[in-house]
């Protein structure tokens, strides 16, 4: 402790000396200021380099001394994890986009197929409609075709064909009232036309009745065919059910016979095993109490517990003799232990007395050491006070100013 105090004191003295040498007192500043003033031209490159270094130093100080913007290192594991997560997310998005594209293509193909099928159906329907119109709906067969027939004028008869033209009525002023010169031909023509209409209607009715009859016959035949087919299927189903029931019955009978036979064999085997077990018990070593049956294959000193019938008289006598020897050995050990305890007690007493003597000597020595240490510390205290008075009155006459403290912590290096 004394050495550490002296080392601290010497360090303080040396620091004060260096400070006094670096910053002399105000009273000692008697040197002329002209010897430090030099009128040399400044180098522009050096000035620019100094200014650049000053700017870099100010920027570095603003980065380092500002705790809000200062960053030390980068969290590389977090950035790597974020990169991996971003890559995994991009991979999932690409896989989802590919799945959506495949689904979209499939839907487009299905839509195109449906559109093509719908167009084909529409085309077939239009084709069938056109074909039906060409076959059964000709313009000439329509009732009002004479109203918009383009060749109507060409087909019309002239306004008057001779004097006996039946179209010339009273309004035509081509024929007077009461003059029906072609009455017979007209009536005859009307009668023939009526007969023709009637015959056409009869033929149309006969044709429709024949078609209806033919349709009814087809329906009856189809119904009879369906009934016969249903009866045939019912008969086949019944025969199949009978065959299945018969097969199941035969299988059940075979399984029942097999089961009964197996039970008989098992019962016979069990009876034979029981008889063999009874015979083995009667003739075995357990009931006959054969001592050799208890001998173990691991050595003559070991026995089989489930076959052992007890120890022989010779074994019991040897066990008693061993127990008596063990009792005698135990008694001898107890006597030796008592003697050792007495000897240990005596040794502990002697050791306690020697320890007390050593403790007293150590206390006397410690008192002497403390006394000498106190005297030495008092001497050091007097020397230290004298040294401090010398430092305060002789050495430390130039106290540091605020300018001295402001030079610290001005650079980032």
Image: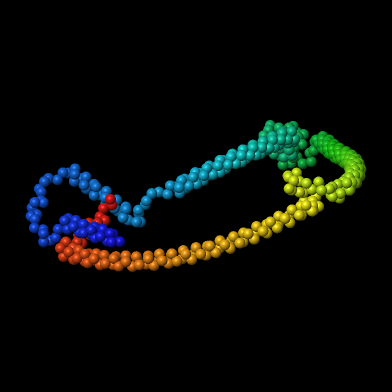
Query: How many numbered marks appear?
Result: 0
202 horizontally vs 2: left or right: right
Q: Can residue 235 be seen in this view?
A: no
Q: Where is residue 51 in the image (x, y as percent from the top left)?
A: 22, 48
Judge left or right: residue 38 versus residue 151.
left
**Rendering colour mode:** rainbow
Residue 410 lies, in percent from the top left, at 25, 55
Q: Residue at x 70, y 58 (%)?
A: 324
Q: In which quarter of the image is residue 251?
A: top right
Look at the image and tell me whether residue 182 can be seen: yes
Of residue 379 and residue 121, the one placed in the foreground of this image is 379
Is 280 on the left or on the right of 101, as rendered? right
Figure quadrant of the N terminus = bottom left
Quarter of the rendering containing residue 12: bottom left
Residue 229 located left or right of residue 115: right
| Residue sitting nearer the eye, 246 or 384 | 384
Query: What residue sits 32% from the left and 56% below the top?
Result: 66
Residue 372, above or below 302: below
In this view, the residue in front, 69 or 269, is 269
How far across and down, in percent of the image, does residue 185 sit?
Answer: 82, 34
> Who is closer to the viewer here, 375 or 247?
375
From the top left corner, tell me how far across and down residue 111 is, in percent.
62, 40
Q: Which residue is painted at 53% across and 62% down in the image?
A: 343
Query: Looking at the image, which residue is at 68% across and 57% down?
Result: 326
């Amino acid at each position: 402790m004394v050495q550490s105090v002296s080392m601290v004191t010497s360090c303080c003295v040396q620091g004060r000396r260096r400070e006094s040498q670096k910053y002399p007192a105000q009273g000692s500043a008697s040197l002329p200021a002209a010897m430090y003033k030099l009128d040399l031209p400044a180098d522009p490159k050096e000035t620019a380099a100094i200014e650049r270094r000053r700017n870099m130093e100010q920027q570095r100080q603003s980065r380092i001394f500002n705790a809000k913007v200062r960053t030390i290192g980068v969290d590389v594991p977090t950035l790597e994890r974020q990169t991996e997560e971003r890559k995994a997310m991009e991979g999932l998005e690409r896989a989802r986009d590919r799945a959506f594209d495949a689904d979209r293509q499939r839907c487009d193909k299905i839509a195109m197929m449906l559109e093509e099928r719908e167009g084909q159906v529409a085309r077939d329907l239009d084709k069938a409609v056109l074909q039906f119109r060409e076959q059964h709906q000709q313009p000439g067969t329509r009732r009002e075709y004479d109203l918009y027939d383009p060749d109507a004028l060409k087909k019309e008869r002239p306004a008057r064909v001779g004097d006996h033209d039946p179209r010339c009525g009273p309004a035509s002023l081509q024929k007077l009232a009461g003059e029906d010169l072609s009455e017979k031909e007209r009536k005859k023509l009307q009668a023939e036309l009526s007969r023709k209409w009637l015959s056409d209607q009869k033929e149309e009715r006969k044709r429709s009745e024949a078609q209806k009859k033919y349709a009814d016959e087809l329906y009856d035949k189809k119904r009879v065919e369906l009934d016969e087919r249903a009866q045939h299927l019912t008969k086949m189903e019944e025969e199949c059910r009978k065959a299945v029931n018969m097969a199941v019955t035969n299988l059940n009978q075979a399984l029942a016979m097999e089961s009964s036979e197996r039970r008989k064999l098992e019962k016979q085997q069990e009876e034979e095993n029981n008889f063999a077990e009874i015979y083995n018990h009667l003739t075995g070593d357990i009931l006959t109490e054969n001592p050799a049956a208890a001998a173990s294959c691991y050595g003559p000193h070991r026995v089989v517990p489930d076959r052992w019938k007890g120890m022989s008289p010779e074994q019991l006598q040897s066990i008693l003799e061993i127990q008596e020897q063990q009792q005698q050995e135990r008694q001898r050990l107890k006597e030796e232990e008592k003697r050792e305890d007495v000897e240990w007690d005596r040794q502990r007493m002697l050791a306690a007395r020697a320890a007390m003597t050593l403790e007293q000597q150590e206390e006397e020595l410690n008192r002497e050491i403390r006394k000498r240490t106190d005297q030495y510390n008092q001497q050091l205290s007097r020397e230290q006070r004298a040294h401090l008075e010398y430092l305060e009155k002789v050495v430390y006459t130039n106290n540091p100013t605020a300018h001295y403290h402001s030079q610290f912590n001005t650079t980032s290096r």
